[in-house]
Amino acid sequence: MRLPILSPETAPPASRTILDGIEADLGFVPNLAATIAASPVLLAGFDGLRRAVGDASFDAVHREIAGVAVGVAVDNAYGVAFHSTVLARLGVDPQDIEAMRGGSEPRDAVHAAVYAFARAVVIDRGAVAEAVVQRALDAGLQPAELLDLVTECAFAGLVGLVDNLAGRVELDEPLRPQAWKAPRPGRR
């Protein structure tokens, strides 16, 4: 489906305010948001989830790890590039970022539990095995934190749906160094 990248000037009036808010928060309008701006309804849902997962009480590293896990699971090139870029800015070890981009867990036990949980939420469509949940709890995550991760999974899943529907949204300049292609079968 052809989904053009709109600007605040070319977007429907109901989307312009939302795009302005995104730009105020991030300093630019990401191409993913500009791609869905043709639908004020979808853009409002996207922005609501974006703001919810951006809450300061949600561990930023955990959020971004979940974003990579979901992106890899649903073949979302835009999301993997975005979350990999943010993880690098947050100081996560580049080897761990590469492992996650390849479908493997990072070395840190808590980060690995986050990755496994987020991946299972998406792949198993919410029917996460008790062992995966218990692993996350044993790693020190609280039930509320797991629910926060579900929110990021929903957000990352939405981004993946749009990225795949559009046949890949063009990466923004800051994301291009982290461009991603799905690993070949058998590499995981």
Image (cartoon, rainbow, N blue to C red):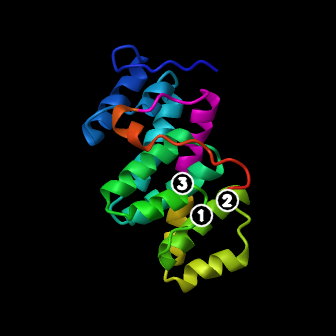
Q: Is residue 58 visible?
A: no
The residue to which callout 1 is attached is 104
Residue 91, which numbered label? none
**Cα–Cα span, label 2 and label 1:** 7 Å
Find residue 128 and report its horizontal and vertical position in percent. Answer: 70, 68
Task: Of the two numbered discs 2 and 1 on the same chain, state the one appearing first in sequence.
Answer: 1
The residue to which callout 2 is attached is 188
Q: Is residue 15 visible?
A: yes
Give the residue at x 46% y 44%: 81
Q: Is residue 180 above or below residue 117?
A: above
How many numbered marks, from 0 up? 3
- Label 3 with label 2: CB-CB less than 8 Å: no
Q: Is residue 76 above or below residue 10?
A: below
**Cα–Cα span, label 3 and label 2:** 10 Å
Name the secondary structure under disc 3.
helix
Q: Is residue 128 above or below residue 12?
A: below
> Type of residue at label 3?
Arg
- Label 2 with label 1: CB-CB less than 8 Å: yes
> Type of residue at label 1?
Ser
**Residue toward you, 121 or 19:** 121
> Type of residue at label 2?
Arg
- Magenta range is 154-171
> Which quarter of the image is occupied by the C terminus?
bottom right
Within 10 angstroms of label 1, few (less than 14), some, or many (20 or more) residues? Answer: some
